[in-house]
Amino acid sequence: MSPTNWVQIAAVVVLLAISTPLLGNYMAKVYGKEKAPGDRFFLPIERFIYRICGIDAEGEQRWSIYVISMLVFTLLGTLALYLILRVQGHLPFNADSQKGVAPDLSFNTAISFATNTNWQNYAGETAMSHLSQMFGLVVKQFVSAAVGMALAVAFIRALVRRRRTTLGSFWVDTVRSITRILLPITFVFAIVFMSQGAIQNFHATKTVQTVATQTVDSKGQVTRTQSVPGGPVASMVPIEGLGDNGGGAFNANGAHPYQLPNPISSTLYIWLALMIPFAFPWTFGKMIGSLRQGFVVLTAMVVLFSVGLFIAAGVEGAGNPKFPKGVSQAATASHPGGNLEGKDTRLGVGLSTLDANSITATSTGTTNSAHESFLPVGGTVPLFQIMLGEVDPGGTGTGLYGMLILVFISVFIAGLMVGRTPEYLGKKIQARETKLAAVYILVLPFTVLVFSAVAIVITPGLKSLSASGPHGLTELVYAYTSQAHNNGSAFAGITGDTMLYNITGGVTMLIGRFALIIAALAIAGSLVRKRAVPVTAGTLRTDTPLFTGLLIVVTIIVTGLTYFPVLALGPLAEHFSGGF
Amino acid sequence: MPTDTIAVPPPAPPEEDHFPHRHAPGQRPFDPVVIRQALVQTFTKLTPWHMVKAPVLFVVYIGSIWSTVLFVRDFSSNSSSDNVFSALVVAFVWFVVLFGNFAEALAEGRGKAQANSLRKARAETVAHVLQPDGSTVDKPSTKLEVGERVRVEASEVIPGDGDVVQGMALVDESAITGESAPVIRESGGDRSAVTGGTRVLSDRIVVTITTPPGETFLDRMIALVEGADRRKTPNEVALLVLLVGLTLIFVMAVATLQPFAIYSGAHQSVIVLVALVVALSPTTIGALLSAIGIAGMDRMVQRNVLAMSGRAVEAAGDVSTLLLDKTGTITYGNRMASEFVPVGGHEELELARVVLLSSLADETPEGRSIVELCETRYELTPVDMPGAELVPFTAQTRMSGIEWDHRSIRKGAADAVQRWVEERGGQVPPDLAPVVEGIATGGGTPLVVAEGSNVLGVIHLKDTVKPGIGSQFAAMRTLGIRTVMVTGDNPLTAAAIEKEAGVDESMAEATPEDKMDRIRAEQAGGRLVAMTGDGTNDAPALALADVGVAMNTGTQAAKEAGNMVDLDSDPTKLMDIVEVGKQLLITRGSLTTFSITNDVAKYFVIIPAMFYAVFPKLSDIDILRLHNPHAAIVSAMIFNAIIILFLIPLALRGVKFKAMNATAQLRRNLLIFGVGGFITPFILIKLIDLLIIGPLGVH
């Protein structure tokens, strides 16, 4: 890895060290009942929104109503997005005269953005009008992120409150997430990205004459033209990152110079993607009144994240072992070093693997390199990060409650070993919580494995793969894993815009989002009713390094045991057989 | 001895082992008879409707039947080496089921043996039912109705549960408690309850039947020790949910593995897939879960405690407050002499001599303790006192004494003795008042001793705390359990005993209502409360407490209200009960952890073996370097089955319990069962491959 890469990674660490406590404390205030900073400015705006939407700002909801509100809200939004995509040809802000998007692709895309997945079976520059991007996709990027945050807050309240039934108001939590957290930060960053060269316009695609040869076809015909797209990009990039959405305006996404023009933007973008998920455990600690408990969750996230980065950067940085001896892959002044296949030389191994690890450990999915071109072990890292359930640190809010459910599993297994029935923060983890936590943990592997197992043996499934053997299997499993876990990154290589993948992908995204949310909120609904058992010397301490270690091991084992067989036939077989 | 001021040996010697294990005949943990019966039941339990109660084992059961069918079907077409491999896999899949059944049968067997001996006591007897006119009509005990009055004579068996309404008798309750010393049962008061199946040794009593036949204490006891209507406890259900979830996902992971394998060109045989499911499913804990629960109840029975439900045993582990009656639990209840304090310049030995004379004829417990103190500390021997005249204690005089050989000796309340001395023209020495006051403030009772007109000194009587009880409270504190002493004493006395015994808190001048309020307050704060009780006025509190232990000597009402009955009627046992509860949960958690961490090694062994044909290099994962793919799978399957057998003793005895705080407890058990669970299979699988499978030539 080049020295620049080290500086960039260090920069992200420092920026996160600053933003985590600041944003964490701020969010705790935003979601608390007390006064929050900026009330004078935000309250009138929010009151106005509540009034026109008919929201009772004081009204609290039980878990079932909270979930139903979320479902109705999301469903209507998804439908609206589907319609916009279908009829975009007849709507304004369509400089490139894009036609309506096909039904199955619209289905997949609408669900994809509504579920915070942002899996894209299309290329933005050739499929989407500027209106679809702005009022369709970006709107969904804001609200789907806000919904995740609202759910996490409801989940935290279930642990804070005692013998109550309500978890807060879905509407208020969602609105405040947008007005007070997502909008202000993205506003600032839109300007920052523009200053770096991200574009913000409504231009049609321009065809320009280039000096260099662009393509030479098989008959020797030389083209010296290039299509230069326009669009409202700078306003999309910040929420794409901050909301852990990951769906970009262009096909090349994180590697497109109009989106993230330089390494500085790429570095800032990674910070954005990690900002809210890492702040949430802090917010959690604040809200439950024990920062130590928050640190345990945060530490587990940091450790799992760092191990992934360490492996990916290490493997990719060491270069391809199949290169002939004597060919140096070390970083020099003119060569970024390492395995550079499928990577942007401006970013090098460091920013590519940091991005790969960051956007799969969160639910972002904005790739700036081709994960398919990583070495087998390097490519396993982003896949495994998604398989972990995106909990280190995970999506906006979803990462926190995902990790807390793993905490419950850890508490359940280990808690018994101290001779008490399991409890977390004084709340007893009983049959109902265990059942729902088991559903939460198992539903995704179930979905991923069943859909992959079917697709891998039928012709339409196999036809989309670009590779055969273990690598082809990885492509396919990655596609379903990414969609089911609402990540949205692609391993690349697979042709996703087919009837089979559009429909099954859409279904897996729906299951991945809503089955999990319902299970998580049902747990919250059950926990909020419980009284809290006071802490004694006989209580399993969940704020110790020992428990942190346990949580990390449980997280890895729960995932590892489920996915190990398929990983063995995919990337591990590829690695050990050396067929790359 | 808690302090060196007490030199009196306690009336009842403390039990060295505070877990009195009393084994009924045939109840030794691994009695050959029990094992033989368990072996038979291992197979009779193989019916689907029984297997379905243990869902994890049920999956294995289905897998074993399926693989057996396939093995038989393909026997003739397979090569002999394939047949050897398949036979071994199928056999060890079956062993998982069989070992699970065996563990359960073994756990049940110990209770069954005891139930059988109890049944003998329940044999039908003839009841003499009293008629209104005073005559009796005989009818079988099984036909008795509630409210009928029966007469029981010496050497007859009491026909049913009831209350003594007339008379008093010595009753042999050994059939139920295992305690051979007879107990007194009398009408009225807290010793009126009698149990059907016990035998009257002397006298004659009239008993009102309070429980219909078939629901008596003995019947319930038989059902409990036998585990006839054992229901899964809440935590057991929750754990089972998690285990079933894990099993389901492994079934899915393996079922979907076949398409991936087909894609990779490595089609797998069903037997291998069954092997993988069985290896990965949490079979160890799945097979032992039921045995652990039964054994937990059984451990209570061995301590002579009958838990009416497994739920109560589980709750015992969660208890965070113990309400302990002072008398009988913390102290012996008698005021005993602890020291003699001379006043007015008299010698201690001189005082002791006089005290001895004053108390030789005193048959009260206090009197006896004084004599004992004289003998042990001052090495005085009782003298013969012909013609001595005892002056008994009365409420008016508030002192007792003796007239002998022209000597008048008195001991009693300070003011009474003072008056007596002054009447004889004596003077009270000035140092008497501070001594008396000092003893009273310390929670003790001062007895002033005088001879003639001379005040010689003071006997310090104190309520004696049971030796060793302080360390038990300290152990409870380590476990995060608060001990609260409940006493009718005044706050001063209560505070003194609180300090000496080392309880966390005391409730002085407590009424039964105070006790109820306290339980409610604790529960409102989320704490679980355990208490003991024997009187009828304890019944509401016993019912309210999360763990209410009724003494067997107590009233019928108390026994019905509590969720446990201590047959030894030893309130100190509350702390044992807590430990048994915790031990049960720890055993469950430890074996779950062990079972899950085992999977890692099994994966490392089985997966590369399965795909050896297509990806031979994948065997680099298999760090054990086993002989060959078939040997690897068979070794893993053998390990998977025999580990259950190895762990049966642990499941039945429970993981060793030590009082330590939760973090230390977790660290210890994680190290043994978590880390151990990672390492053990690697070692054992390698050994099995090296010593058994390799030499056998499985390939």
Image (cartoon, rainbow, N blue to C red):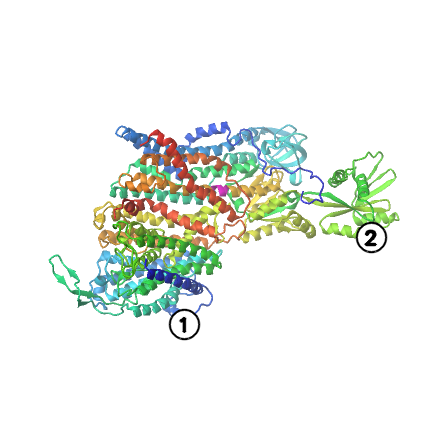
Identify residue for label 1: A41
Q: Is residue B640 visible?
A: no
Query: Magenta stretch containing residue A498, yes or no?
Result: no
Under circle 2, the secondary element is loop
Label tally: 2
> Chain letter of disc 2?
B
- Mark 2 lies on residue: B430
On the rendered structure, is B410 left or right of A271? right
Task: Give percent across and percent down for residue A495.
Answer: 22, 53
The secondary structure that dominates the magenta segment is helix
Does B272 sit left or right of A39 as displayed? left
Q: Quadrant of the N terminus of chain B?
A: top right
> Which tag is nearer the camera, tag 2 or tag 1?
2
Q: Nearer the viewer, residue A429 or A496?
A: A496
Residue at mark 1: chain: A
Amino acid type of disc 1?
A: Phe
| Residue B141, position as x, y percentages in the image | 57, 30
Residue B370 in view, yes or no? yes
Q: Which residues are magenta?
A: B584-588
The amino acid on which the numbered mark 2 sits, given as a three-letter code, is Pro
* Other-residue count near label 1 (Cα within 10 Å), few / some / many at <14 / 14–19 / ≥20: few
Q: Quadrant of residue B577?
A: top right
Q: CA distance from mark 2 to mark 1?
A: 83 Å
Q: Is residue B427 above or below residue A245?
A: above
